[in-house]
Image (tube, rainbow, N blue to C red):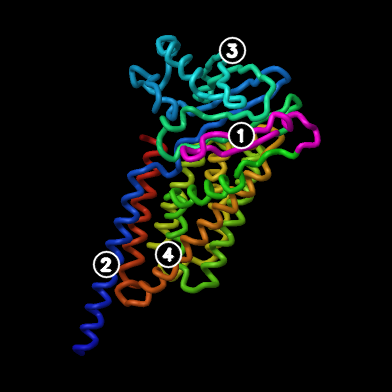
Amino acid sequence: MIPNSRATLRASSIWAGLRKACFISLLTPALSFAHDPGLSTVQLRFLPNRIESEMTFARGDLESLLRLDADDDGTVSSLELAATRPALEQLAREALGVRIDQRVVAAESIGYRLDEANNFHLTGVWPLQRGGTLVLGSALMDRLPRGHRQYVTALAPTGAVLAEALLSAGQNGITLDLKKLFEAEAAPYCNHTTRGFLMLGVEHIATGYDHLLFLFALLLMAPAFRQAALLITSFTVAHSITLGLATLDLLHVPSKYVEPLIAASIVYVGVENLIRRDGPRGRWLLTFAFGLVHGLGFASVLRELGVGAGATGVVMPLLSFNLGVEAGQIAIVAIALPLIWLARKFPAGARYGVPMASSVVVALGGWWLLERTIF
């Protein structure tokens, strides 16, 4: 009996360590938002003698540069907007740097506006001079929070996409050849956009703690590879469908409904784990249904970047972003699933581990649900 007692004690110690690590890893992300903030867009329209720009920020992102809501009531009144007019005009003037053959080009006019969706638009017009190389730089990237991204689209007078780029603090500009700019046969520039959207997808799933917690809760009850593969496939197919439909603007569900539903899906799966200890049957159907909701959450990233707002420039960002999400998801599952199976091999892990982990899932999902509906 002594060897068995030692083995049980050793298994309990191992599982206690795993529980502690799991709890810390789950609790720490809960202090952050579920999605990566800091997304803005820049649309540039090249006309024969000028460049028209429109830079769009969520109000929260712009307030990291300039305090707009002076009374902290959650809205920007006309009086508050008027009070910050000089600062906003200066920000619009500094937002975009334009150089032609190393010569700095000053803006002819600037402006700003606040739309109904609480987004700020900084606009400007720059003269387009003849030259060889045009360099456009987002002068605000160094002042925005770390991890902020800007999706830049350069359009011809006809609306055709001339160039696209995903800017970050490390790559905050785009270079164009003026000689090829208006050539009809010239292929659109790419400027590492594919890689940028691929990495954005990886980053989004890696920091999308609600999506990861949902997958974790599902995998807790997957006894073998076949069941796990079916669950992951169902989730992938479902969120890919709604990601594509929402990005193409064929399906529109406001985030105020999507985000609480994502939190509710986490709570539901966690509670089901606690009630149906024998392993819920037909869970792949439930996973598919909830995956459709999670896909709408993924799509919010591309929609905030302006992808899909027009008829052009959507296929590459959509495919690259989705591929990045899937690559990140596979990498995370490849690490988590063996650890879950290892823990379940121990009697203490199978008996106490799943209920404890599921309880943590319910608690975090419930907090996010309250945060997204009441707080």
Residue 171 in the image: state x and y as whole percent: 51, 39
Residue with the mark numbered 1: 175
Earlier-in-chain disc, 4 versus 3: 3
Earlier-in-chain disc, 1 versus 3: 3
Q: Distance between the residues labelled 2 and 4?
A: 15 Å
Q: CB under 8 Å between callouts 2 and 1?
A: no
User: Residue type at mark 4?
Assistant: Ala
Asked which secondary structure carries label 1, the reply is: strand
The part of the chain drawn in magenta is 162-186
Q: CB under 8 Å between callouts 1 and 3?
A: no
Q: How far apart are marks 4 and 1 (CA)?
A: 42 Å
Judge whether residue 288 is colored magenta: no
At x 38%, y 74%, the residue is 342
Quarter where residue 309 is shown: top right
- Front-most of residues 93 and 214: 93
- Give the quarter of the figure containing the N terminus: bottom left
Quarter where residue 299 is shown: top right
The numbered mark at residue 110 is none
Outermost left residue:
2
Q: CB under 8 Å between callouts 2 and 4?
A: no
Earlier-in-chain disc, 4 versus 1: 1
The numbered mark at residue 108 is 3
Q: How crowded is mark 3: few (under 14 residues within 10 Å), some or many (20 or more)?
A: few
Q: Distance between the residues labelled 2 and 1?
A: 52 Å
User: Residue type at mark 2?
Assistant: Gly
* Left or right position of 335 against 129: left
Q: CB under 8 Å between callouts 4 and 1?
A: no
Residue 108 in the image: state x and y as whole percent: 59, 12
Earlier-in-chain disc, 2 versus 1: 2
Residue with the mark numbered 4: 336
Q: Can residue 304 be seen in this view?
A: no
